[in-house]
Image (cartoon, helix red, strand yellow):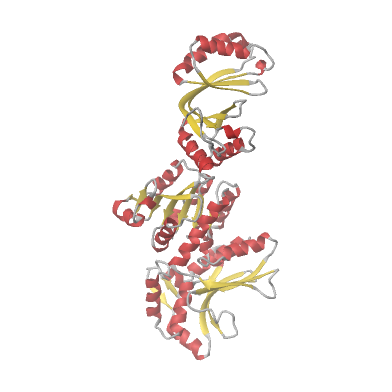
Amino acid sequence: MIGENPPKNNNDITGLASIDNISLIRIEGGGMVGVSGIASRLFKTLAQSKTNVILITQASSEHSISVAVEPKYADNAVKNLTEEFDAELKQRKISTIEKEDSLSVVAVVGANMRRQFGVSGRVFKTLGDHKINVHAIAQGSSELNISFVISSGHLKQAMNALHNEFFFGGRKVWSIYLAGPGNVGARTLALMKKKVSINDRIELRGIINSKQMLFGDDLFLLNNPVEELSTSGKKSDHKMFLQAIAEDNNSFKIFVDTSASEKVVEMYAPLLESGVNIVAANKIANSSSFKFYKELRQLVARGKAKFNYETNVGAALPVIRTLKDLLTTGDKLQKIEGIMSGSCNYILTAVWNGAKFQDALQKAGEMGITEPDPVIDLSGIDIARKLLILVRDAGLEYGMEDIEMSPLAWRDEEGNVHYLDVDKLVGEAKSRGNKLKFIASFDDGKLKVYPKETSPDDPLYVVDDVKNVFIFYTKRYSKYPLVISGPGAGVDLTASGVLDDVLKIIGSVS
C-alpha cells in the first residue's frame, strides 16, 4: 500500500520490489582512479543515447562503475561509450566496457532500516544460504533502500527467500525427496505430513521406488502420496530423479533414503557434492567399500551438506550419536558386544517361549520387523553391516570381508535357502537353563557375528523380544561399560528415527 500517511510498521523492512530482465554495463580500468570527469562523461553519453539508468554502483577504489539499463538500450549504450572512451581504451586506462544480460534488480525497502544494525547482513546471508550470487550492490544514503543485481534465473528464489526471512521470522521451506516408500518410508511421510511444531515448512517434492516415481510442488497436499505414486507415477529413472533434485532452485533440500537399494546409494555422492542433505535408513552406503565410505565423509567435510544415518544401527536408539560423542571428547573404542537385530532376537525369544522357528519367522515378517528378504537378517548380513558401521565410525578401517560370519540361514549358489536347526539349538540351550542369542562383537581387532548360548549371569541373557543392546567398552568406560538398550526394530520406531534425523538437519540451519 502506497499512501501519504502509512500505518506504523514494526518490521525491519516494509517491502520487496524487483525489476526483471535488465542488462548491466560495466566500465573497468585502473586509469579511472582519481581521474575527474569520467562519471560525467559516462552519464552524458548515456543521456545523449536516451538510455534510462535503473541502478548505479561505483567501487570505492574508483576502479569500476556499473549501470543497470533496459536490454533494448544496452548494445547502443556500449557502442556509444566505446566511442566516447576510445582514447582511454587505446591507452588502456580503461580496460573493458562490457555488458551482461539476463539479470534482475531486487530492492529491499523500509524506513526502519535506517541506522538499524544487521539488516543488510541478513539480506546477503539469506542470498548466500540459497547460493545466489550478487553481481552489483547499491544503497542510497538515506538508508531506506538496498538494491542489488542477480541472475534472472534466481529472481523468484531470491524474492521467496527474502520474504520468508523478513516476514515469517526466518521461516524456511524445505524440499523433501524420498526413495523407498515401503513400510518405513510411507510411515515416515505420514509422520512428516502431520509434523507441525516447527517454524519451517516441509514440502514433499518427489518420491521414487524401484518401479515408479512422482513429482509435485508439494505432494503432502495429496490425501495419500504413496497411493498416488502407484496410480499416477511415471516409470522409475534414478538419473531423471537426480536431475529433478538438481533443478530444484530451493537451497534447503533433504534426500531421504528408506530403501534397501544399491542404485539409490549411487546417488549419494552427487547429491552431497551439490549441497543436498541426506538422511539414510539404508545401510548399504556406510557398509560398502571403505573407499566409498571415506568419499562420503570427505564430501560432508566440505560443509555443503549433512549426512545423518542414526537409523542404520538400532532403529531410533541413539547408538551412533552416543559413540560419536564419546570419540569427539577424546575417548577410544576398545570393544563392542551386542544384540543388534531386533527381528532375530524376537524370533529366538519366541522359539525359547515354545513357538516353532518357521512360525516365529513368519510372524516377524507380518509384523514388519524383518528386512523384505528375511534371509538378510538370519544370515547375519544386516547385523554385520551395523557392526561394520560402528567400528568405521570409530575410525577403524574394516570391510565386510573382515567379519567372521556364522549364520542362522544362508543361500547357496543356486539361490536355495538353508537353515540351521534353530528349534533344536534353542531347545538344547534351554535344557541347560540358557538362551540362544544372535550377537555381534568386536574384540582384539576381530569382528564376529554368531549365535551364542548365554547363561543367566550374561548381560545379554535378559535382552528379549525386539530389544537390542549395545555394550561399549572404551578407554573411559573400561571397567563398567556403557550400555544402550531398547527396542531395535519396528516400522514406527525406525520412521520416528528417520524423522528425527530430518528435524536435526532442519534445526541445524539457522
- In this view, the residue farthest toward the bottom is 431
Q: Judge left or right: residue 170 versus residue 420.
A: right
Q: Residue at x 50, y 33 (%)?
A: 16
* Closest to the observer, 287 or 240: 240
Dividing the picture into quadrants, the one containing residue 209 is: bottom left
Name the residue nearer the viewer: 334 or 224.
224
Q: Is residue 295 visible?
A: yes
304 in relation to 99, above or below:
below
Residue 283 appears in the picture as rendered: no
| 377 in relation to 222, above or below | below
Residue 504, by quadrant, is bottom right
Which residue in the rendered view is the most extreme toward the front?
A: 5
Residue 55, image x, y percentages: 54, 22
Q: What x and y, as percent, mark residue 297?
A: 58, 53
| Count of number-bearing discs | 0
- Find residue 294 and report its horizontal and vertical position in percent: 58, 54
Q: Which residue is more in the foreground, 367 or 17?
A: 17
Report x, y in % for residue 288. Answer: 51, 59
Camera-nearest residue between 96 and 105: 105
Vertical comparison of 83 with 335: above or below: above
